[in-house]
Image (tube, rainbow, N blue to C red):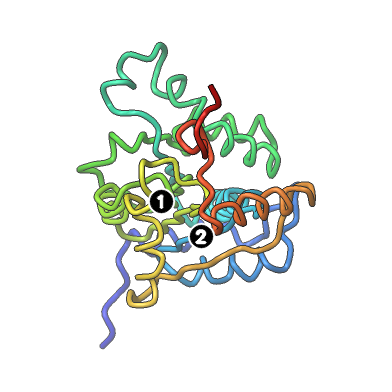
Amino acid sequence: MASKPHTDEVHRKQKVVKNPIKFKITLNEEQKEAKAKILENTITMLAGKAGSGKTLLAVQVALDGLLRRHYEKIIITRPTVSKEEIGFLPGDLREKMDPWIQPIYQNMFALYDKVKVEKLIEDGKIEIVPLAFMRGRTFLDSCIIVDEAQNVTHEQMEMIATRIGLRSKMIICGDDHQVDLKSKRESGFRFLYKSMRTIKKAVGITLLQNHRDPIVDDLIQVYEEASAQGIKLGSSGSSGKSKK
């Protein structure tokens, strides 16, 4: 005789909203295919260059799941400042984190009614968790978005990925071309991305289409070519000796 499903699981299934949520922006075919893979897996590493729509896709998946009651909460985190520095910033936690979370808020407001999104935030349905405050937590019935993950170290990436609890989904967004750490080797994003193929219910996806002005592709190519040629840009990358 088959065992009865857990009461909480039955309750979740009964309250799920089946009708599709109407968003102000429609995903393109590449994003729709990526969303299907995200929904099939527990952890997704979502890679792509600037303007590829990584964050918008992650936010759309999370909002869709929250509004259809597949999840109880959306958890948002990204590398910002240390716990000590956060403590010195004025305001409550949301006010402290606002400058770093604005890109995610902008995508939410672009996708869905701003007043309704603000209400979800006020009700604690969308929670901002600084990276420095994640250790020791377990996120149940949640969709977790990790943005700008190329600036997460190997140690931080392990800590983040192991926070996921039952009935949750994690989307880790990053771009290897925008690493702000001292060395790209410090970034834990590419290592975990490559490891996805060895982990069940995990996938690595790379978005290729540009959603910004076409000039962005040309600008990225300029910098990629400079990097490939070994040209060091910045104050420490000046070549030659100064003239006297």
Check the image and report above or below for 180 versus 222.
above
How busy is the neighbourhood of tag 2: few (under 14 within 10 Å), some, or many (20 plus)? many
Percent x, y for residue 156?
A: 28, 47
Percent x, y for residue 202?
A: 40, 70
Residue at x 36% of width, y 51% of height: 187
Answer with the quarter of the image where residue 120 lies.
top right
Q: Reading the chain from its start, which is encountered first: label 1 or label 2? A: 2
Check the image and report above or below for 220 versus 104.
below
Find the distance from the CA under tag 1 to the CA under tag 2: 18 Å
Label 2: state its secondary structure. strand
Name of the residue lying farthest toward the top: 90
Label 1: state its secondary structure. strand
Residue at x 53% of width, y 40% of height: 233
Say which of 94 and 178 sits in front. Answer: 178
For badge 1, the amino acid type reads Ser
Nearer the observer: mark 1 or 2; the answer is 2
Say which of 39 and 12 sits in front. Answer: 39
Name of the residue lying farthest toward the front: 244
Residue at x 72% of width, y 48% of height: 216
Percent x, y for residue 225?
A: 62, 56
Answer with the quarter of the image where residue 89 lies.
top left
Which label sits on residue 123? none
Name of the residue lying farthest toward the bottom: 1
For badge 2, the amino acid type reads Leu
Say which of 235 and 117 sits in front. Answer: 235
Check the image and report above or below for 237 versus 166.
above
To which residue does mark 2 refer? 46
To which residue does mark 1 refer? 142
User: Which quadrant is home to the N terminus?
Assistant: bottom left
Percent x, y for residue 83?
A: 28, 26
Residue at x 56% of width, y 57% of height: 229
